[in-house]
Amino acid sequence: MARQPVQARARAKYDAIFKAAAELFAEQGFAQTTVDQILERAGSLSRGSLYNLWKDKDELAYTVVQESLIMDSITPTSPRLQGVVDASILLAVLTPHVTVIKAANRLATEQGKAFFGYLWRTYTPLIAELMTQARDLGELQPGVEPADWAALWVDAWVGLDLRFRENYDELAVAVDRLNQQIVNSVATPETTAKLQVSIGRGHELIHTSQHADAYYTSLQEHLKEKRGSAPKPTAAG
């Protein structure tokens, strides 16, 4: 058998370590996850395999958080406020099924690390920009301050993520309710009538996300597990 090129082997190690780290961070958080656990789950790789790619566990975790972002999946549309709703509900639909997103959400709420707060520090200005455009287009009610409401929207989302981590299947429903309440508070009646604010909107957007493959793979694995755990029919006596 021909040897794999060095670059291909390095990429395979990168992917194995990244996947193992994301799984463990999602399951038990940063502090409880050790380098040895990551390497064992990655296929019993050596410590050098990790340290040739990342300086330390912190840098690896930071990479996981960075890879979770979904704003590139959101296309500016009219009304501009639709983009804010889309980002919120797409992230809520993806979170229960995409390991890297679950890991990033958990890592970003672990205080004392460089990646603490990364998600809301990144999302809030992007949402504020969309809301500023919405204001300039006359989509917002008088007196609505885009930066303040962007921070509130993102902070509320983070709160729901924390609340539903033990039952992520309910997250999208809760975020749907949140979006409806905020839209009714900030948007003009004319804008509200044009917006698609539903869980269904989130599912429609999945195919535009860089995490779509991971989402569908997770669903397939879930269905296989359900079929495997179903009781087998017994022969009639």
Image: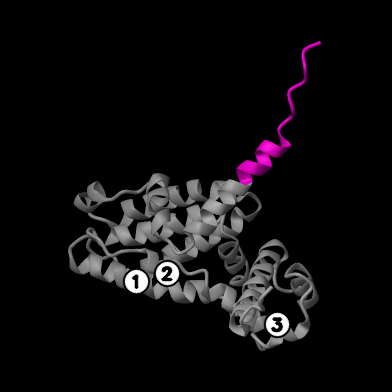
Residue identified by numbered label 1: 128
Q: Which residues are magenta?
A: 222-237
Q: Position of residue 147 (x, y in %)?
A: 35, 72
Q: Identity of the amino acid at label 2?
A: Ala
Tell me the residue at 49%/49% (across/down).
Answer: 172
Which residue is at the far top?
237
Residue identified by numbered label 2: 151
**Would residue 145 be seen by someone viewing this image from the given angle?**
no
Question: In what element is the residue under mark 2?
Answer: helix
Q: Is residue 172 left or right of residue 30?
A: left
Q: Point out the frontmost of discs 3 and 1.
A: 3
Residue identified by numbered label 3: 50
Earlier-in-chain disc, 3 versus 2: 3
Tell me the residue at 38%/75% (across/down).
Answer: 125
Q: Identity of the amino acid at label 1?
A: Ala
Earlier-in-chain disc, 2 versus 1: 1
On the image, which quarter does residue 37 sit in?
A: bottom right
Q: Position of residue 29 (x, y in %)?
A: 70, 68
Question: In what element is the residue under mark 1?
Answer: helix
On the image, which quarter does residue 138 sit in?
A: bottom left
- Crowding around mark 3 (Cα neighbors within 10 Å: few <14, some 14 to 19, many 20+) is many
Q: Identity of the amino acid at label 3?
A: Leu
